[in-house]
Image (spheres, grey):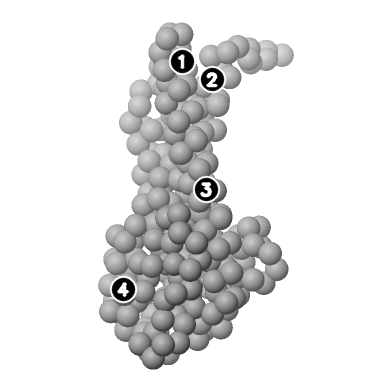
């Protein structure tokens, strides 16, 4: 039986393949953490209205603070000091605790993204100096193909939750939160600000767009780069 020869170029190629989905998913995450996503989402005709009174203008007023908090270096007072016009706090303590946890997860994910990009760049330099560029390119193509499979799976879950049965996405969403957050710290009342700003449809579409963006990147690498020998 023939076995694959694990020489340095082969190891390099598969390391590039492993890092490629991380880089593409991180890019999609960073795009979603900009005002572009929530501005488009709130303007969608199907986006659910807030039965407790937030208008679209209210959501566009308050959502930027939550998103900006996740990517800046501020402490939780950045959100804790926000108040409604009547002086009552925008967020309760349970919501603030959760946002601290979310910030840790988001910034950890962004650090993984930055690291994956840096390593890919260093590997490209290393490959060029060692005349292993064909292996590097093939690694990118392979990683793109892996990303297509991952994106298709994520897109199916998000799309099925929208079009077929909300429980499909909810099961995935619950599992995702159980993986990253303790207990039921991520569950809130419908009257809480976090749910009013970011209802479940917001997250269904976020995962769907993450899948679409990652799929685009994966497809570009898998079929836009020529296989090298």
CA distance for labels 4 and 3: 25 Å
Crowd around label 4: few <14 · some 14–19 · many ≥20 (10 Å): some
- In terms of secondary structure, where does tag 3 sit? helix
Q: Closer to the observer: label 2 or label 3? A: 3
State the residue position of label 4: 60
Image x and y of residue 72, in percent: 42, 55
Residue positioned 39% across, 91% down in the render: 86
Residue located at (45% from left, 23% from top):
122
**Mark nearer the N terminus (4 vs 3):** 4
Residue 141 as seen in the image, left or right of residue 103: left
Tell me what residue is drawn at x 29 percent, y 66 percent.
Answer: 40
Does label 4 or label 1 sit earlier along the sequence? 4
Q: Secondary structure at mark 1?
A: helix
Neighbour class for label 3 at 10 Å: few (<14), some, many (≥20)? some
Assess whether mark 1 and mark 3 are in contact (beta carbons under 8 angstroms).
no
Q: Position of residue 85 (x, y in %)?
A: 35, 87
Disc 1 residue crowd, few under 14, some 14–19, many 20+, Cα 10 Å: some
Residue 62 position within the rendered picture, expressed as x and y whole percent measured from the top left:
36, 74
Q: Where does label 3 land, which residue?
A: 109
* Camera-nearest residue between 203 and 106: 106
Q: Which residue is mark 1?
A: 126
């Amino acid at each position: 039986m023939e076995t694959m020869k694990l020489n340095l170029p082969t190891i390099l190629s598969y390391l590039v393949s492993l890092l490629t989905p991380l880089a593409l998913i991180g890019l999609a995450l960073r795009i979603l953490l900009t005002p572009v996503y929530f501005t488009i989402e709130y303007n969608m005709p199907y986006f659910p209205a807030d039965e407790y009174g937030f208008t679209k203008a209210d959501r566009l007023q308050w959502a930027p603070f939550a998103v900006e908090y996740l990517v800046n270096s501020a402490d939780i007072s950045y959100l804790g000091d926000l108040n409604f016009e009547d002086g009552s706090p925008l967020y309760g303590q349970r919501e603030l605790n959760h946002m601290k946890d979310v910030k840790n997860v988001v910034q950890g994910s962004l650090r993984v993204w930055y690291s994956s990009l840096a390593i890919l760049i260093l590997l490209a330099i290393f490959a060029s100096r060692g005349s292993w560029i064909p292996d590097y390119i093939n690694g990118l193509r392979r990683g793109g193909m892996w990303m297509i499979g991952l994106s298709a799976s994520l897109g199916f879950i998000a799309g099925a939750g929208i079009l077929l049965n909300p429980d499909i996405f909810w099961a995935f969403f619950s599992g995702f939160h159980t993986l990253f957050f303790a207990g039921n710290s991520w569950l809130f009342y419908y009257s809480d600000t976090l749910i009013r700003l970011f209802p479940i449809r917001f997250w269904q579409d976020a995962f769907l767009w993450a899948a679409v963006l990652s799929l685009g990147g994966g497809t570009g690498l898998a079929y836009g780069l020529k296989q090298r020998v």
